[in-house]
Amino acid sequence: MCCGNRPLSTSTPQPQTSSAAVSSTVSPVRQNRARFEYTGKTALTVVSPLTGKRYRFHAPGAQLDVDARDRSWIAFVPHLKRTA
């Protein structure tokens, strides 16, 4: 079906926003992360069953930012503790 001489568009037009409006609604990356420290004796690799992300703690005392979605699951891994 056609409307006049214009071809039909298959994409939905996106509303335009100013860069100021976009930047004020973007939350800092840190809010989407939780910091964990490895307290074991060697190294540790953890693969989250929730997000599939791989976290590699190379040595005792190593700290990594963990995706907020993995926070609850990672908290139960032995030798990992959440830092402030």
Image (cartoon, grey):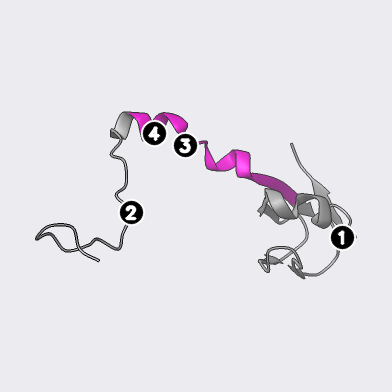
Figure quadrant of residue 57: bottom right
- Mark 2 or mark 4, which is nearer the start of the sequence? 2
Q: What amino acid is labelled 1 in the image?
A: Val
The residue indicated by pointer 1 is 77
- Counting other residues with Cα less than 10 Å from the Cα at mark 4, is it few (<14), some (14-19), or many (20 or more)? few
Residue 82 position (above or below residue 26): below
Figure quadrant of residue 9: bottom left
- Mark 1 or mark 2, which is nearer the start of the sequence? 2
Where's residue 65, x and y in %?
65, 51
Q: How far separated are the C-alphas under marks 3 and 4?
A: 5 Å
Q: How far separated are the C-alphas under marks 3 and 1?
A: 31 Å
Residue 23 position (above or below residue 79): above
Q: Which residues are magenta?
A: 21-36
Figure quadrant of residue 15: top left
Q: Is residue 26 magenta?
A: yes
Q: Nearer the viewer, residue 81 or 60?
A: 81
Q: How far separated are the C-alphas under marks 2 and 1?
A: 45 Å
Q: What amino acid is labelled 2 in the image?
A: Thr
Residue under the point 75% across and 50% down: 36
The residue indicated by pointer 3 is 26
Quadrant (top left, top right, bottom left, bottom right) of the N terminus: bottom left
The residue indicated by pointer 4 is 23
